[in-house]
Image (cartoon, grey):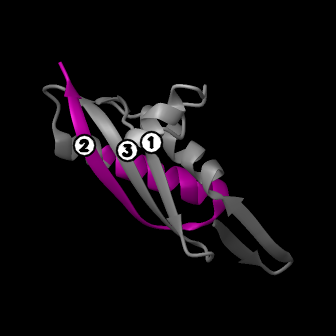
Amino acid sequence: MSATLKTDLGKIEYNEPYIASIAGYSALECYGLVGMSQKNITEMISNLFKGDNLKKGVKIKTDGSENVIVELYITVKYGVSLAAVAENIIDKVKYSIEKETGLNVQSVDIIVQGIQI
């Protein structure tokens, strides 16, 4: 499904992989984040054959309107404050998606799946 932004002149549709790319790129710029994790075993296997890592660990939920929910599956660096890293990622991802698309990000959920020493 895609997210739709309605304007006076018409509508703009953003597909989920595009929004996921924005979220993944924004998250990777944040300090303390080592990388994105696979959401499940199916994604792990499919990513072995793909070169695109920006969408890895990103799940986008839309209802066809301009509202978007983002889930990020991440691996963080040992010794950093998880709360500070998560808050930084949430702010950056929310800002980037809203700035680039004009969509409304309802929430950014962080799922920490690992710590790298």
The crowd level at tag 1 (other Cα within 10 Å; few <14, some 14-19, many 20+) is few
Query: What residue is at 46 percent from the left and 40 percent from the top?
Result: 43
The amino acid type, in three-letter code, at marker 1 is: Thr
Task: Give the alpha-carbon distance from disc 1 to disc 3, as whole Å.
Answer: 6 Å
Crowdedness near tag 2: few (<14), some (14–19) or many (≥20) residues, C-alpha within 10 Å: some
Mark 3, secondary structure of its residue:
loop
Q: Nearer the viewer, residue 30 or 50?
A: 50
Looking at the picture, which amino acid does disc 2 mark?
Val
Q: Looking at this view, name the residue that lies furthest to the top.
A: 117
The answer to whether residue 117 is above or below residue 92 is above
Q: Are marks 1 and 2 in contact (CB under 8 Å)?
A: no
Residue with the most extreme right position: 9
Q: Is residue 94 magenta?
A: yes
Q: Amino acid at mark 3?
A: Asn
Q: Quadrant of the N terminus?
A: bottom right
From the viewer's side, name the closer residue of 26 and 114.
Answer: 114
The residue identified by callout 1 is 42
Chain part drawn in magenta: 88-117
Q: Can you identify the residue that label 2 sits on?
A: 112
